[in-house]
């Protein structure tokens, strides 16, 4: 019993400390937000002097020095008007800006995802050429020899038009641009957009009409500004990992740009991908399967650049070669991520309890297809989980009901042996044995529910499908806290009712701690997503109903035995 008391005090102290530190962190004066005011047709700002924006990956054939990089930018004075304005690409789900300097994606607005619930006309801007802290680019190109011009992300491309729109009824939109070195090397770079999809195809058609062979390698990289940020368990925006990640064909790895070892990450990988992660959204590059790509992370000042460079391919004179990669720019929709392939859905991070969280999400998603409401889906799945653990809960409930029935006898033993703890413990154990009561049985359902609770939290945290999802009345976003704290208060009331329904713990100090648990849980859940509070409330109400019924059955059995 002393061990149980010590454990409960430790848990209580940890919860109180966590709430206190989180309150101080989450309610500190916020930094002034940076407005994203760039218009679709505006010219990208010039990168910072010491930026990684001009970094071209090295190939096995040559190092790319700054002088060579400058040579790779072929002159295009005749097309100054067209090249000075980004291409504007519009599909049913994306609004994209493509800079003709390098053909890089320097703006990506997600049309179906408002930045905030109260501003539905302002979409999430995933990629941006604006200066820090919003700098976020997807760069791509072909790199070659040190003293040869090549269509890198520093080269100047040409396009016959500036606006591309996915027409009604069309399922695909191609955005081509061309480049030539003037010596017979002609390249067409094409972005391929599909209706309803955030996956983007990238294809290079290379023709060597010169008299000598050429060597080129394809690469793609993500450049992003980063700032150190403390992660808060109660703030879904800061708790999720934000930064670069790679998949090596077997497992995924988040790279900490503040770690000396991760900041120098370099590896040869086949069948992998690289990504820049953030809460519920991702930009990723998926190279062709079976080809060894060199992955590398560079960190300079407050920028990181994660790149994947393919093998060098020799293009004989008169030959044609095609390079290609798959890109993804958008929300972490598991169905679309899986469709891109290569386990890209692993960018949805459910943590160490993925083995529970993934089936949980699958179940919620299935029920949502039937109900059309994520709140009702949470309630129904909670009921199904409760049904799954019914035998265990039933056995626990019977043990708790028996403890309630022998409560007067337990109190009498405590009064009799209050000065002799050894005899008190022995007498209590004899009573438990005689009445076939397991005093720890009531804890088992709660202990088993803890992994499910954490899994629910991770699903609500990471699943963009539930982002800004409404339930009923004032609950207009299940992924954020209840704005009026109604659900936490209802949950606290239900927990108090459950405490009153169950027998009091035999240890007085333990009983006092348990009395405070509804209040503690109410304060803690006030800062959690309302969907998680809805799960706990539903589970508690179902537990009350089950325990009430079990108490009735046990009391009826006891009355029958007495008669």
Image (cartoon, rainbow, N blue to C red):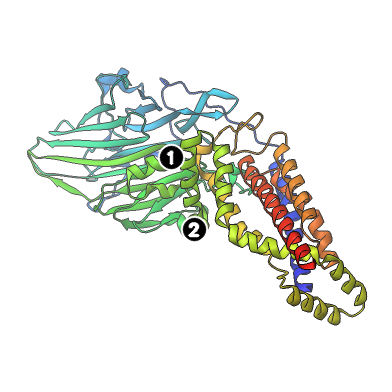
In this image, 435 relative to 287: left or right?
A: right
Q: Residue at x 69, y 63 (%)?
A: 398
List the residue tagged with mark 1.
333
Please identify the residue farthest to the front as the structure is shown: 563
Q: Residues within 10 Å of mark 2 (few under 14, many from 20)?
A: few
Note whether residue 190 is visible: yes
Res 87 quadrant in image: top left
| Rendered location of residue 182, percent (x, y) | 16, 30
- The secondary element bearing badge 1 is classed as loop
Of 209 and 532, the residue lying toward us: 532
Of 339 and 408, the residue lying toward us: 408
Res 180 quadrant in image: top left
| Rendered location of residue 20, percent (x, y) | 75, 50
Q: Residue at x 26, y 23 (%)?
A: 159
In this image, 466 relative to 204: left or right?
A: right
**Disc number for residue 221:** none
Of 100 and 169, the residue lying toward us: 169
Of 139 and 55, the residue lying toward us: 139
List the residue tagged with mark 2.
260
Quick check: 332 above or below 511? above
- The secondary element bearing badge 2 is classed as loop
| Rendered location of residue 396, percent (x, y) | 67, 63
Q: Residues within 10 Å of mark 1 (few under 14, many from 20)?
A: some
Query: Which quadrant, please, contains the C terminus?
Result: bottom right
Q: Earlier in the sequence, mark 1 or mark 2?
A: 2
Res 250 quadrant in image: bottom left
């Amino acid at each position: 019993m002393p061990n149980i008391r010590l454990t409960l005090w430790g848990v209580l102290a940890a919860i109180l400390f966590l709430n206190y530190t989180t309150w101080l962190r989450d309610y500190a004066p916020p930094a002034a937000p940076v407005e994203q005011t760039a218009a679709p047709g505006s010219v990208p700002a010039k990168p910072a002097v010491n930026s990684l924006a001009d970094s071209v990956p090295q190939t096995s054939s040559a190092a790319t020095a700054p002088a060579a990089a400058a040579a790779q930018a072929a002159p295009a004075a005749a097309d100054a008007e067209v090249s000075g304005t980004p291409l504007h690409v519009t599909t049913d789900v994306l609004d994209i800006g493509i800079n003709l300097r390098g053909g890089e994606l320097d703006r990506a607005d997600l049309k179906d995802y408002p930045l905030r619930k109260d501003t539905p006309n302002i979409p999430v801007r995933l990629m941006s050429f604006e200066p820090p802290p919003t700098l976020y680019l997807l760069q791509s190109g072909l790199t070659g020899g040190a003293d040869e011009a090549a269509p890198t992300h520093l080269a100047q491309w040409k396009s016959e038009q500036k606006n591309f729109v996915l027409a009604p009824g069309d399922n695909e939109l191609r955005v081509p641009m061309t480049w030539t070195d003037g010596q017979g090397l002609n390249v067409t770079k094409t972005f391929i957009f599909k209706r309803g999809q955030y996956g983007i195809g990238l294809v290079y058609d290379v023709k060597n009409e010169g008299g000598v062979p050429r060597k080129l390698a394809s690469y793609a990289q993500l450049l992003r500004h980063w700032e150190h940020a403390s992660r808060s368990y109660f703030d879904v925006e800061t708790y999720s990992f934000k930064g670069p990640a790679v998949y090596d064909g077997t497992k995924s790895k988040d790279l900490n740009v503040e770690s000396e070892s991760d900041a120098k990450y370099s590896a040869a990988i086949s069948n992998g991908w690289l990504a820049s992660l953030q809460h519920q959204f991702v930009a990723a590059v998926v190279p062709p399967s079976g080809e060894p790509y060199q992955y590398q992370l560079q960190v300079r000042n407050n920028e990181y650049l994660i790149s994947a460079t393919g093998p060098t391919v020799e293009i004989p004179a008169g030959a044609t070669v095609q390079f290609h990669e798959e890109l993804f720019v958008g929300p972490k929709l598991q169905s679309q991520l899986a469709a891109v392939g290569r386990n890209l859905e692993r960018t949805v991070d459910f943590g160490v309890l993925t083995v529970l969280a993934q089936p949980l999400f699958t179940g919620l998603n299935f029920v949502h297809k039937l109900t059309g409401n994520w709140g009702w889906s949470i309630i129904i799945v909670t009921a199904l989980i409760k049904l799954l653990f019914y035998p265990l809960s039933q056995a626990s409930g019977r043990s708790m009901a028996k403890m309630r029935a022998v409560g007067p006898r337990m109190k009498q033993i405590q009064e009799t042996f209050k000065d002799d703890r050894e005899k008190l413990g022995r007498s209590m154990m004899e009573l438990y044995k005689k009445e076939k009561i397991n005093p720890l049985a009531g804890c088992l359902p709660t202990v088993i529910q803890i992994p499910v609770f954490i899994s629910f939290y991770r699903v609500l945290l990471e699943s963009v499908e539930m982002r800004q999802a409404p339930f009923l009345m004032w609950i207009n976003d299940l992924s954020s806290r209840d704005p009026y704290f109604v659900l936490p208060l209802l949950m606290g009331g239900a927990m108090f009712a459950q405490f009153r329904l169950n027998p009091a713990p035999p240890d007085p100090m333990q009983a006092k701690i348990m009395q405070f648990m509804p209040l503690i849980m109410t304060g803690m859940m006030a800062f959690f997503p309302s969907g998680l509070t809805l799960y706990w409330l539903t589970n508690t109400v179902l537990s009350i109903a089950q325990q009430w019924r079990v108490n009735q059955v046990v009391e009826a059995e006891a009355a029958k035995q007495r008669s």
